[in-house]
Image (cartoon, rainbow, N blue to C red):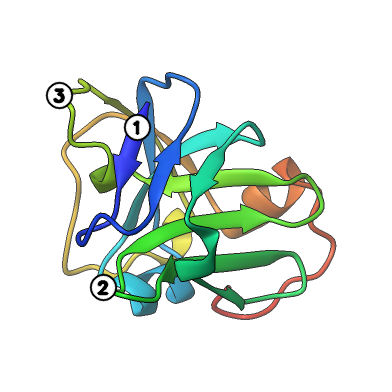
Amino acid sequence: MDGKCLCGAITVTTPDKKSIDACHCGMCRRWGGGPALGVACGSDVQIDNVDKLKVYKSSEWAERAFCGECGTHIFYRLLPTNQYFIPAGLFQNGIEFEFKEQIFIDMKPSYYEFANQTLNMTEAEVFAKFALSENIEGT
């Protein structure tokens, strides 16, 4: 799959994936103004023009990156496993994603609700799944 930021300065190439997940943690909502809708792409991700990329270490186990030109979110990456989660909106080439999972469901505010039937995971379940030993409030 090929994606790019708003200005086209950064392009991302990932293996074909068909599902997206939503994250309701406090950091994702603060970062993007709502839940993050991302594609779990594993570690096989190619990013071109990394000199335009701005990276922020948002916790002991993860970093977030955005385009330094236009501000588009490029990825969330788990440091221990090198797993990338790429915003679904970067991929504009007609991919029909399936909405599969919502994480940090116990942190979701009451002012929005998705109608899709998904697997819903709490903060504790997410930390267990990714073997993250420390919990920082609001992730």
Q: In which quadrant of the rendered image does the C terminus lie?
A: bottom right
**Residue beneath disc 2:** 70
Residue 101 falls in image quadrant: top left
Residue 100 appears in the picture as rendered: no
Dot placed on the residue nearer the N-terminal end, 2 or 3: 2
Label 1 environment density (alpha carbons within 10 Å; few <14, some 14–19, many ≥20): some
**Circle 1 SS class:** strand
Q: Position of residue 31 (x, y in %)?
A: 37, 75
Point 37% across, 63% down: residue? 73
71 left or right, relative to 74:
left
> Do the numbered discs 3 and 1 sit on residues whose CB atoms are within 8 Å?
no
**Residue beneath disc 3:** 94
**Circle 3 SS class:** loop
Point 36% across, 79% down: residue? 30
**Residue beneath disc 1:** 2
119 left or right, relative to 45:
left
The amino acid at mark 1 is: Asp
Label 2 environment density (alpha carbons within 10 Å; few <14, some 14–19, many ≥20): some
Point 25% across, 54% down: residue? 8
The amino acid at mark 2 is: Cys
Q: Nearer the viewer, residue 101 or 18?
A: 18
